[in-house]
Image (cartoon, grey):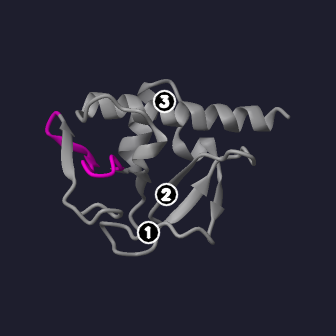
């Protein structure tokens, strides 16, 4: 699978015998299925992606899905001044995370999963903080 940003082949990382995610070594972006993401989030004690909410930004250019070759949709967090964002494909449900949005030491599946969890922990915390205002 080619990276939607760099157009280079992404490395597929597995957990056991199943593909977990694809990682771009150029931009550090991550592509994963929403079901895999929800499993990662639930194992970390976080709510599923759907429960975190967010708002679509149809005006933002999000690039093209590497699976379906259709435009992706940017989903912004609830914080208005500094919204966190991820991108999703409305056809296949794939999730794209920009490498610049999380700090990862190494490029193995465990390290990337930690980065994903921290990104969504912050995303969820900002959503919770905004809801209480």
Quadrant into which the C terminus falls: top right
Residue 116 placement: quadrant: top left
The CA span between labels 1 and 3 is 24 Å
**Residue 132: within the magenta?**
no
Instruction: Return the mark for residue 87.
Output: 2
Total number of numbered labels? 3
Badges 2 and 3: C-beta atoms under 8 Å apart? no
**Residue at the location (45% across, 37% down)?**
102
Q: What element carries label 2?
A: strand
- In the image, farthest residue toward the left: 17
Can you identify the residue that label 3 sits on? 118
**Residue at the location (55% across, 61% down)?**
74
Badges 1 and 2: C-beta atoms under 8 Å apart? yes
The magenta stretch is 16-30
Instruction: Return the mark for residue 63.
Output: 1
- Earlier residue among tags 1 and 3: 1
* 54 sits left or right of 118 in the view: right
Image coordinates for residue 101, horizontal then vertical, percent: 48, 42
**Residue at the location (19% across, 59% down)?**
9
* 107 sits left or right of 97 in the view: left
Of 24 and 12, the residue lying toward us: 24
The label nearer to you, 1 versus 2, is 1
Image coordinates for residue 33, horizontal then vertical, percent: 36, 51
């Amino acid at each position: 699978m080619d990276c939607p940003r760099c157009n280079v082949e992404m490395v597929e990382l597995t957990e056991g015998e199943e593909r977990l995610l694809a990682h771009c070594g150029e931009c550090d972006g991550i592509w994963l299925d929403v079901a895999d993401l929800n499993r990662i989030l639930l194992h970390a004690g976080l709510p599923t992606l759907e429960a975190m909410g967010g708002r679509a930004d149809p005006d933002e250019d999000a690039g093209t899905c590497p699976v379906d070759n259709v435009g992706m949709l940017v989903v912004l967090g609830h914080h208005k001044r500094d919204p966190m964002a991820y991108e999703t494909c409305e056809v296949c449900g794939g999730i794209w995370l920009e490498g610049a949005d999380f700090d990862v030491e190494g490029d193995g599946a465990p390290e990337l999963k930690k980065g994903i969890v921290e990104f969504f922990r912050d995303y969820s915390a900002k959503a919770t903080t905004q809801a209480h205002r």
